[in-house]
Amino acid sequence: MRSSERHFRADLVVAYAGANPGRDPVSAVRAQTFLWLAQRGSAAVLALAVVVHLATMIVAVRGGLSAAEILERTRGSAGWALFYAVFVLAVAVHAPIGLRAILAEWLGLRGRAVDVGLVLIALALLTSGLRAVYAVTRS
Amino acid sequence: MSVAATSFRRNDARARGHAAFWAFVVHRVSGLALTLFLPLHFWTLSMLLGEAPAFDTFISWTGAPLVKLAETLLVLALAAHLAGGLRLLFVEFVGWRADAQKTIFALGAGLALACALAFALNGAGGGFPK
């Protein structure tokens, strides 16, 4: 770690400790850094996936949607299954972290109980998303 | 009124007039809308685990004008969130300069609108349900 980064980290820890008495500032800043990285990492994956998704939607909606039309493209396709599984995984990481910022900044909801709830939301998104992927790609 | 309160209010108004503030608002609102839509999206697709007619009955409902409008707005939200996210990634990791913010924001908005229009016009041409 460069010295400027170390100073930045130290400043964050001091600022956090001042604003949140009673919580361990070092682990909180570490968690914050991890969440920031996870949000950017998943965003990079999503950037590619969403471009493909937008293009598919614009083309697929031509002439109306039907079960047969969707399944014709996806059923039994390992490629689409892998693509959508990665998409769902990235979304399950990305959306709850965004939600966490909204809950904290707009509603003042923060703390362990909120974080546990967000992990549950992430797991619910992951399982329901993978179920949907299975529904459209199983052979 | 105290000096601190006055200067805060003045700063606040200035911040809100900036393109980056609107980029933030669009990013947040679109992200929230997409997150709330996801459970519905996954639930609908999971209908395909059962009989196809159930899904088709549901999908025929998407032909209603208001649902069509909501769908188009969701595509707009997705495209806008994509553009806003790319802007953030480029600003944070590639070092794009702040003085280009308005241009980046305008390009993103244009791209998002183009996607939503393409989606809406394609759907309108094809007609629902099939």
Image (cartoon, rainbow, N blue to C red):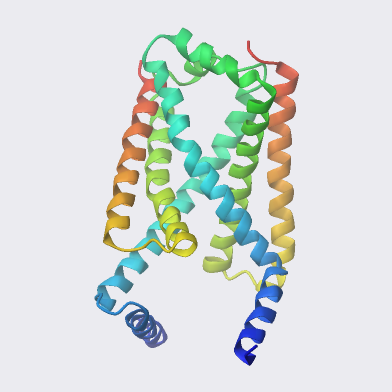
**Could you tell whether B70 is left or right of A120 in the image?**
right
In percent of width and height, residue B73 lies at 65, 38
Q: Residue at x 58, y 51 (%)?
A: B29
Q: Residue at x 50, y 41 (%)?
A: A49
In percent of width and height, residue B69 lies at 68, 31
Q: Is residue A25 above or below residue A94?
A: below
In percent of width and height, residue B40 lies at 46, 31
Which quadrant would the C terminus of chain B be assigned to in this image?
top right
Q: Residue at x 57, y 41 (%)?
A: A51
Camera-side residue: A131 or A50?
Answer: A131
Q: Is residue B116 above or below residue B63?
A: below
Q: Residue furthest bottom?
A: B3
**Could you tell whether B60 is left or right of A91 in the image?**
right
Which quadrant would the N terminus of chain B be assigned to in this image?
bottom right
Camera-side residue: A107 or B42?
Answer: A107
**Could you tell whether B74 is left or right of A42 in the image?**
right
In percent of width and height, residue B13 lies at 70, 74
Give residue B74's quadrant in the image: top right
Q: Is residue B25 above or below residue B74?
A: below
Q: Is residue B129 above or below residue A87?
A: above
Q: Residue at x 41, y 18 (%)?
A: B47
Number of residue marks: 0
